[in-house]
Amino acid sequence: MKRIIAVTKAYSSCVGEGAFVSEIFDDEASKLRKRGGDAVEYGATTGRPRRVGWFDAVATRYGCKIQGATEVALTNLDVLGYLDDIHFCIAYQIDGNQTVDFPNPSELERAIPVYKKLTGWKTDISHIRSFEELPKQAQNYVTHMEKLIDVPIRYISIGPKREQIVDRGIKRQHN
C-alpha cells in the first residue's frame, strides 16, 4: 500500500498575491508571524512579511484529496501555544451560500471564512513526546482538524528540532 503524507501547518501562511480566505491582519497577524515557523514568517528572498491566517480546513481538505493523501504531518502546533482562543476556517460563505467544498478561483475571491473557535492551551508543548501528553485543548484542536480534512493526522511537530515530533501511529483505514 502506498503512503502519501501531506504536510500542513497548524495555521496558514501565504507568499504573494491572491485570495487567502482565512487571512488575519494587524497585531494579531504580527504576533503569529513573529512566533511562526522556519526563520519566522518572512520571505526568504524578499524579507517581506508573509501573509498569515487561521488554519483553513476547506483548502487543506481539497489539497489532501487532490494529492491522494493517506496521512498528514501537522507542523508548528507549538506556535499556537500563546493564544487564548484559536480559530479555524470550517467553511466558506459565497454569495450567501455556505460550502465546505473548495470553489473555483472566481468564487474564491468572494469567499468569506466561517470560523469555529476553540480554547487555546496557553502553555509550552515543545517537551511533549506523545499525543496523550498534549494539553486536552491541543488534542481537541488536532482531532477537530482531522475530522474536517478527513485524513488522519499521524505526525505533529511541537518544535523546530528533529526530535520534536509526535508520531500518533494512526493510518487511514482502507476498505
Image: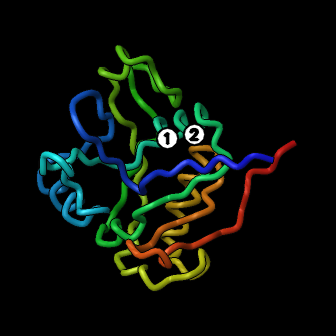
x then y, percent, for residue 156: 52, 66
Q: Is residue 104 above or below residue 136?
A: above
Q: Is residue 131 left or right of residue 2?
A: left
Q: Secondary structure at mark 1?
A: helix
Instruction: From the image, tell me which residue sits under label 2.
Output: 64
Q: What residue occupies the far bottom of the structure in this picture? A: 127
Q: Is residue 11 left or right of residue 33?
A: right
The amino acid marked with disc number 2 is Cys
x then y, percent, for residue 87: 37, 53
Mark 2 and mark 1 residues within 8 Å of each other at the beta carbon? yes
Q: Residue at x 65, y 69 (%)?
A: 168
The amino acid marked with disc number 1 is Thr
Q: Is residue 152 above or below residue 122?
A: above
Find residue 81 and report its image quarter.
bottom left
- Give the crowd class for mark 1: few <14, some 14-19, many >=20 residues within 10 Å: many
x then y, percent, for residue 29: 19, 53
